Image (cartoon, grey):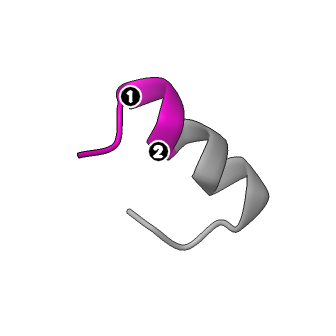
Amino acid sequence: MISEGGWRQALTSSEGWG
């Protein structure tokens, strides 16, 4: 699973996860 900081970084890179 992705850590809180991990999924947050992904959102910043490509918004469209949550």
Label 2 SS? helix
Mark 1 burial class by Cα count in 10 Å: few <14, some 14-19, many 20+? few
Residue 17, quarter of picture: bottom left
Image position of 12 (left or right of 5) = right
Q: Residue at x 47, y 44 (%)?
A: 7
Q: Amino acid at mark 1?
A: Glu
Q: Amino acid at mark 2?
A: Trp
Q: As displayed, is residue 17 above or below residue 13? A: below
Residue in view at x 70 percent, y 68 percent: 14
Circle on res. 4: 1
Q: Is residue 1 left or right of residue 5?
A: left
Left-right relation of 6 to 4? right
- Decide whether residue 3 is among the magenta residues: yes
Q: Are marks 1 and 2 in contact (CB under 8 Å)?
A: yes
Looking at the image, residue 9 lies above or below residue 16: above
Residue 6 in the image: state x and y as whole percent: 50, 36
Above or below: residue 1 compared with residue 6: below
CA gap between label 1 and label 2 equals 6 Å
Q: Which residues are magenta?
A: 1-7
> Is 4 contained in the magenta span?
yes
Disc number at residue 7? 2
Quarter of the image with the C terminus is bottom left
In x, y percent, where is residue 16? 54, 73
